[in-house]
Image (cartoon, rainbow, N blue to C red):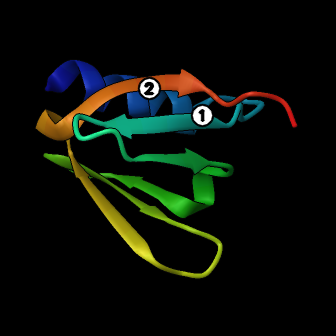
Amino acid sequence: MEDFRQELKDLLDAEPFVPFVVTSTDGFAIPVHTSKRALVGLRMLVVSDEEGRLYHFPFTGIAHISEAEAA
């Protein structure tokens, strides 16, 4: 759990920012296009999509984090 937390913090703090995708254990995936739309908490990641919807990912429910593919 702490591994995902630190990895996410590092990804969000990276300069320059590199977009990434978070995939949950049930297969739901959401891209993180900017560090301004994501927040790492003590036990979860919160991501806001472009329409303002919030998605909560407990670290225990994250399957993997991958670099976003270029469009």
Task: Give the mark, 2 or 1, whose residue is nearer the N terminus.
Answer: 1
Residue closest to the far top: 3
- The residue at which mark 1 appears reads as 20
Secondary structure beneath label 2: strand
Q: Is residue 68 left or right of residue 60?
A: right
- Quadrant in which the C terminus is drawn: top right
Rendered view: 18 above or below 55: above
- Quadrant of the rendered image containing residue 54: bottom left
Residue closest to the far front: 27
Residue type pointed to by label 1:
Phe
Q: Residues within 10 Å of mark 2 (few under 14, many from 20)?
A: some
Rendered view: 9 above or below 3: below
**Residue drawn at x 78%, y 31% as measured from the top left:** 16
- Quadrant in which the N terminus is drawn: top left
Q: Is residue 52 left or right of residue 4?
A: right
Residue closest to the far bottom: 52
* Count of numbered tags: 2
Could you say which disc has been placed on residue 65 in the image? 2
**Residue drawn at x 24%, y 18% as measured from the top left:** 3
- Quadrant of the rendered image containing residue 6: top left
Rendered view: 64 above or below 56: above
**Residue drawn at x 46%, y 78% as measured from the top left:** 53
Tell me how far mark 2 sits from mark 1, CA to CA: 7 Å
Q: Is residue 13 left or right of residue 10?
A: right
Q: Are marks 2 and 1 in contact (CB under 8 Å)?
A: yes
Residue type pointed to by label 2:
Ile
The x, y position of residue 2, in whole percent, is 17, 24
**Residue drawn at x 67%, y 52% as measured from the top left:** 34
Q: Residues within 10 Å of mark 1 (few under 14, many from 20)?
A: some
